[in-house]
Amino acid sequence: AADLLEKDFGITSNVWSVTSFNELRREGIDVHRTNTMHADDKAKTCYVEDCLTGMTGPVVAATDYMRLYAEQIRPYVKANYHVLGTDGYGRSDTREKLRHFFEVNRYYVVMQSLKALSEEGVVDVKLVNQAMKKYNLDPEKANPVTQ
């Protein structure tokens, strides 16, 4: 998706790999508790906050798990945060088909990134429609969550 954003739309991005949203959440909860228990001390920040400090723009998380998995870190992401995930029943025989069905593949990540950037006034919302057309994404496709 990062390559497509840059090649097709001239937008650079950062790619992060998350090995455990669960661990990031636990650490965030621990930091929050520490800050509460030591309210007079300088507040600490968690790893997610530290990683994203100084970054601009929206954050898009894509996972082959339910969206809720990546939603766990929402309190620690201070940016416009969007999550794509495979909520629903598995109906695909390959990962590629699964990601397409649940709208989590690279093309949907690009589309969501452009939509988030348009919400922040960085790009024109027309780019979202251009991406959908370029990548053959059907706006009338049935919602995979309700299928």
Image (cartoon, rainbow, N blue to C red):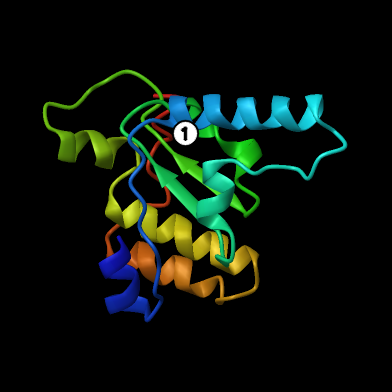
Mark 1 burial class by Cα count in 10 Å: few <14, some 14-19, many 20+: many
Q: Which residue is mark 1?
A: 70
Q: Residue at x 41, y 26 (%)?
A: 66
Q: Residue furthest bottom?
A: 10
Q: Residue at x 35, y 27 (%)?
A: 65
Is residue 68 found left or right of 91 in the rendered image?
Answer: right
User: Which quadrant of the figure contains the C terminus?
Assistant: top left
Q: What element does badge 1 sit on?
A: helix
Amino acid on which the number 1 mark rests in the picture:
Ala
Number of disc labels: 1
Above or below: residue 60 compared with residue 31: below
- Pick the residue in front: 85 or 12: 12
Residue 140 in picture, x, y percent from top left? 42, 47
Residue 18 in picture, x, y percent from top left? 36, 40
Q: Residue furthest left?
A: 93
Toward which corner of the image does residue 30 lie, by quadrant? top right
Q: Residue at x 59, y 40 (%)?
A: 46
Residue 134 seen from this side: no
